[in-house]
Amino acid sequence: MKEKYLGTGRRNQKLLTRDKILESAQDLMGKGDDFTLEDIAKKAKISRATIYRYYSSVEILAAEAILDLNTKSSEEIILEVKDLELKEAILAIQDYYNNLTIDHEAGFRKYMSFVLNADKSKELRGARRKKTLLMLLQERVKDMNPVELENLANLATVLMGIEPFIVTKDVCHLNNEQSKEILKWGMDKVLESALKTI
């Protein structure tokens, strides 16, 4: 989604609209036919102008829709970690997203290339990692300053997913397991410091 549009108005409604767009794209993709953003807008029962606020090209939407099929919802992940202590829950969330990255690395890299080459527009991707972390932190951490809580969610997000894997693999020349270990080590150090006051 375009950052400017997501940053205004009712965020929850925009996330629901985004989900409706992704579901419509997945349905059309499942039929094997070529489609346009206008076709998806019609299927999702939204205007052409609305879909262009979320996606600048059908390639970006299709790449995200494929990845979305293979990704658990934030609610599912939170349910899976509900019995873990906070630190272990965050590490389990990191492990989920890092394993997802390894399993679908080519798709994530393809999606990022579309986003980075999209007419210099700023595409805001699904933001699932941060959403999941914020859900967990807001549910469990009541004594942390809201700004610090947001900062923790942002920093933890940086330590999982395709972006840190590109750095650890392409720049640091680590393999998948080494990448997971260094990112887990980094997360552990961040959490050790951030959570010691609560």
Image (cartoon, rainbow, N blue to C red):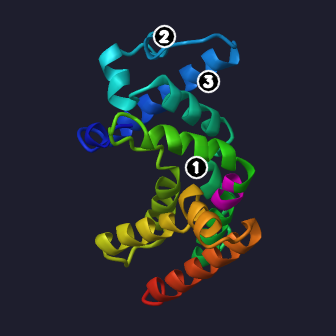
Q: Secondary structure at mark 3?
A: helix
Q: Position of residue 105 (x, y in %)?
A: 68, 50
Q: Residue at x 42, y 29 (%)?
A: 17
What's the mark number on residue 26?
3
CB within 8 Å, label 2 to label 3: no
Q: Position of residue 8 (x, y in %)?
A: 23, 41
Local crowd at mark 2 within 10 Å, few (<14), some, or many (≥20)? Answer: some
Instruction: Give the residue number, with chain letter if any, for mark 1.
Output: 75
Neighbourhood count class around disc 1 (C-alpha, 10 Å): few under 14, some 14–19, many 20 upward: few
Residue 194 horizontal side relative to residue 96, left or right? left
Location of mark 2 (residue): 39
Q: Nearer the viewer, mark 1 or mark 3?
A: 3
Between 20 and 50, the one lying in front of the other is 50
Q: Which mark is residue 178?
A: none
Secondary structure at badge 1 equals: helix
Q: Residues within 10 Å of mark 3 (few under 14, many from 20)?
A: many
**Residue 179 sits inside the magenta stretch:** no
Q: Is residue 178 above or below residue 164?
A: below
Q: Earlier in the sequence, mark 1 or mark 3?
A: 3
Mark sitting earlier along the chain (2/3): 3
Any part of residue 117 in sight: yes
Query: Which is more toward the observer, 19 or 164?
Result: 164
What's the residue at 36%, 35% (across, down)? 14
Residue 130 versus residue 5 in the image, above or below = below
Question: Horizontal and vertical percent for residue 31?
Answer: 69, 12
**Magenta span:** 97-101
